[in-house]
Image (cartoon, grey):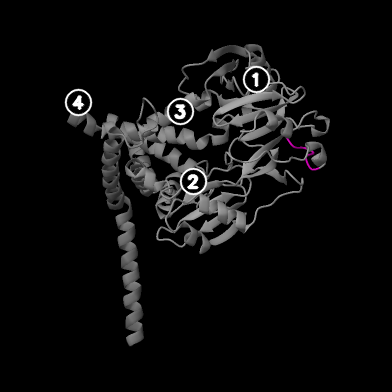
Amino acid sequence: MLFVGLQVFIWSATGLYMVMTNIHYIHGEHLQKPSPVLNVSSLKFNHADVLKSYPNADSISLFNRVGEPVFLVQEGRESALVNATTKELMPKVTEQEAREIALFQFHDSAGVIANISYLKDSAPSELSARHLPVWEVQFEGIASPTFYISESSGQVVTKRHNPWRIFDWFWRFHIMDYLHGEDVGNVFFLVVSITTLLSTLAGCCLVYQRVLRNFVQSSVRKFANKWTKGRTTHVN
Amino acid sequence: MLTKRANAVLHKWIATIVSIQLVIWLGTGLYFGLADDPKASGNQFRQKVEHKSESLQTPTLVTLKKLSSELSGAKRVSLVWRLDKPYYLAFFQETAHGYQKQSVKWFDTETGALSVINKNYVTELAQQSLKHAEKNTLVENATINLISTGTKDIPSERNAIWAVALNNTDNTTIYISDVSRKVIAHVDDHKRLKNLMFQLHFMDYFNTGGFNNIFSKVFALLTLLLAITGIRWLFISKVWKGKFVK
């Protein structure tokens, strides 16, 4: 009971955190400013010009990156950036550009970058490896907000902050998969869940015996008396 | 600090309130651990739709300047293909997730005219997303509706969606987003059972598609109190001292 009780405490504490914090806040949606509006009337080149160079493109998107319009060409899992003013292929995002992109998009205009590092071969657990290579830009602040900026597309592919990291750890404790936080069907979880379910059903029996039985019995008795009285009156 | 008696009374009355929900949480949690995931995904007969064939010729595209009045306020303009036809897709409100409320406009790239989809497009896309021997008959006999008020099958969706309800044994419905013009889900009875389990686990009785609701907050708080009073009772009671410490 002690072991199960401890896990019930963990389930309820982690569950309480999850339901109390808004999921969009946990995703860090507030950390990034909305994209700026495009000015298409001053464009020198169009999608058609880019398509000539990339005829197999799956999509070509025009948007503003740090105040200048760019085309993002997506071809399968590969992507390339084309300057919409010069039509030139843009080189991979440098550290300085990653800083500019991060500061331009960070919600707090007074934000200060605490650390920046280049991740090529291995991703931390908070980032999907499919986004590599990326620039990891950490901002100063108690929540330690972090932007992951794709080296090829220059886009913020993932945003993380401490409330997300706490959520992630709580999720691992909630599903009892402490290593990866993915397998809800692990044996440990199933054994403890079944034991707790049996304990809870026993608790329900106790609740019935100690709290509800008198109420149920008196209600049934009242109903039976009323029904019998009604029948007697009707017969007379 | 609570006295032993107050702790026991509090434990008893909280248990009275949350006991059934606790059984539901544990039961649905066990279901998630034991459920057959591939079947419960609803994707038994789903296949990926290729929107752009390799042999397509380079299309004729109107310039964005010709659409400048229509594109006023746009944040992103993408050239995309849907069922081998090119379109301009303009985003006026971008969101982190596709299910959140978005504001977009679609344009025919040859004429620059605003584009809307109809039942023919939806039928074609639904057919292409199915891997089933009788897919043509299934889709031809399907009921097609445009839903703008949300659906219980995909409670988190905030945009207009097309529902193609097939007349098969599993009651499969194919959902197509009016915003992205892509198939967003195949929902069948197996998936609906999983949805019901999520709804019960999240106490999402108003079909918001999330767990940040008042019921789950109140019950999570009460359950935490139940666990704390229970553990306290276990540790400090005479029963503990008598049975375990001696």
Name the mark nearer the viewer: 1 or 4: 1
Secondary structure found at label 3: helix
Q: Please, what is the three-letter code of the amino acid marked with disc 2?
A: Phe
Please provide percent x and percent y for residue A109. 71, 20
Q: Earlier in the sequence, mark 4 or mark 2?
A: 2
**Residue B74's image quarter?**
top right
Residue of label 3: A168
Q: Would you say the residues marked 1 and 2 are in contact, meaning their CB atoms lie under 8 Å apart? A: no
Residue of label 2: B215
Q: Quadrant of the C terminus of chain B?
A: top left
Residue of label 4: B245
Q: Taking B38 as reference, is B147 above or below it?
A: below
Provide the major secondary structure of the magenta segment. loop
Q: Taking A203 as reference, is B172 above or below it?
A: below
Please provide percent x and percent y for residue A194. 27, 41
Q: Residues within 10 Å of mark 4 (few under 14, many from 20)?
A: few
Nearest to the observer: residue B145 or residue A207: B145
Q: Please, what is the three-letter code of the amino acid marked with disc 3?
A: Asp
Nearest to the observer: residue B18 or residue A158: A158
Residue of label 1: A102
Name the mark nearer the viewer: 2 or 3: 3
Secondary structure found at label 2: helix
Chain designation of label 2: B
The residue most toward the left is B246
Q: Residues within 10 Å of mark 3 (few under 14, many from 20)?
A: some
B213 left or right of B170 in image = right
